[in-house]
């Protein structure tokens, strides 16, 4: 009888041990599954979209904002030529940044336009137009077929410009991949038209404008923009913030420079259009007083503010 009890106890211990081993094994597998489930997978194109905004349509690579602004201006000029069949005039007073951006475009593609310079601004001549005055209708589009043909030509011109801008970014991206020892990403990224999520699009080189045959920006105007930018950044630094309400900053600058708000707003717009990768206005709110002016303080701290503007104003 005692032997039988001993055998039963031994069997029970064995059963308990087997159950315990099975439980431990199940627990290990469960924890392993949980850990694997919680591990974040690396999906570059998702990170890129979150970092740089909406995915580009048409299968293009994303562009930094300073390049997108140039492409947008070119598109507006081409569309205007297509619709109105006339030369375009940009004045210093009303089109300060547009003039500089046109000169940037001519640096990228010298054959894009021809320009005439006068004391008040520039006249942009499209290569497919030869119009001496606004009343000259010799080159007016006379048929739908001609309109379609010119639309196709303009589309090709835009594609060529887009390829030039993409190339500028790709060169910088390739350098970045070499630094982080991730050259293999280039082939992967080309499939999805994306850049590595550690790559900052704003690192792409600034496009310097070509120099005009005669200076159309006065020294006083250029100096005012330099003083404006310096005071703006100094005020941000004193407050230790990277954003301010639009109405507040306009009032502060208006008092400091003793100028009307409309002139301050125009200059602020000029600065933001020249440095779109470093400054921005969020206008999501209906109330204009709630607009927010953002400043990328981290990028400006490493740069000389005067050099930033000098490369655009060649003063």
Image (cartoon, grey):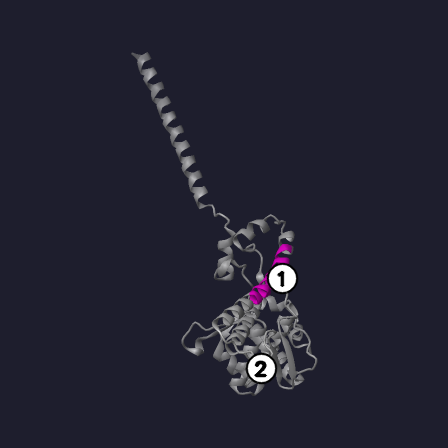
Tell me if mark 1 has few (under 14), some (14-19) or many (20+) residues whose alpha carbon lies within 10 angstroms of its own. some
Circles 2 and 1, Cβ within 8 Å, touching? The answer is no
Name the outermost residue toward the right. Answer: 213
Residue 106 appears in the figure: yes
Q: Quadrant of the C terminus?
A: bottom right
Magenta stretch encompasses residue 67: no
Q: Using the rendered view, name the quadrant where residue 18 is placed.
A: top left
User: In this view of the protein, which residue sits in the foreground, 91 or 285?
Assistant: 91
**Alpha carbon distance from label 2 to label 1:** 29 Å
**Left or right of residue 237: residue 219:** right
Q: Quadrant of the N terminus?
A: top left
User: In this view of the protein, which residue sits in the foreground, 162 or 308?
Assistant: 162
Q: Is residue 24 above or below residue 200?
A: above
**Secondary structure beneath label 1:** helix
Q: Main secondary structure of the magenta part?
A: helix
Residue 277 appears in the figure: no
Q: Earlier in the sequence, mark 2 or mark 1?
A: 2
**Secondary structure beneath label 2:** strand
Going 35% across and 23% down the picture, which residue do you hit? 15
- For the image, the number of numbered tags is 2
Mark 1, residue position: 168
**Left or right of residue 36: residue 197:** right
Mark 2, residue position: 89
Going 67% across and 75% down the picture, which residue do you hit? 310
Q: Using the rendered view, name the quadrant where residue 66 is placed.
A: bottom right
From the top left corner, tell me how far across and down residue 110 is, in percent: 66, 70
- Boundaries of the magenta span: 156-174
């Amino acid at each position: 009888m005692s032997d039988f009890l001993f055998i039963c106890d031994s069997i029970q211990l064995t059963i308990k041990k087997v159950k315990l081993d099975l439980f431990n094994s199940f627990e290990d597998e469960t924890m392993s599954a949980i850990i694997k489930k919680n591990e974040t997978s690396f999906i570059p194109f998702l990170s890129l979209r979150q970092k740089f905004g909406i995915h580009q349509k048409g299968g293009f690579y994303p562009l930094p904002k300073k390049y997108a602004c140039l492409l947008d201006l070119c598109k507006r000029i081409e569309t205007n030529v297509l619709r109105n069949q006339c030369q375009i005039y940009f004045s210093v007073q009303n089109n300060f940044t547009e003039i500089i951006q046109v000169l940037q475009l001519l640096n990228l593609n010298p054959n894009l336009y021809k320009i005439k310079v006068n004391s008040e601004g520039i006249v942009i001549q499209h290569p497919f137009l030869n119009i001496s005055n606004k009343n000259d209708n010799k080159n007016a589009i006379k048929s739908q077929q001609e309109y379609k043909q010119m639309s196709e030509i303009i589309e090709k011109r835009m594609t060529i410009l887009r390829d030039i801008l993409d190339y500028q970014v790709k060169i910088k991206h390739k350098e970045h991949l070499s630094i982080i020892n991730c050259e293999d990403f280039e082939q992967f990224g080309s499939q999805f038209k994306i850049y590595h999520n550690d790559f900052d699009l704003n690192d792409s080189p600034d496009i310097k404008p070509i120099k005009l045959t005669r200076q159309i920006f006065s020294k006083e105007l250029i100096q005012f923009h330099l003083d404006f930018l310096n005071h703006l950044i100094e005020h941000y630094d004193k407050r230790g913030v990277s954003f301010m309400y639009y109405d507040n900053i306009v009032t502060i600058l208006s008092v400091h420079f003793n100028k009307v708000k409309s002139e301050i707003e125009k200059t602020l717009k000029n600065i933001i259009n020249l440095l779109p990768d470093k400054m921005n206005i969020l206008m999501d709110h209906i109330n204009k007083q709630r607009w927010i002016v953002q400043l990328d303080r981290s990028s400006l701290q490493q740069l000389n503010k005067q050099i930033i503007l000098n490369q655009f104003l060649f003063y």
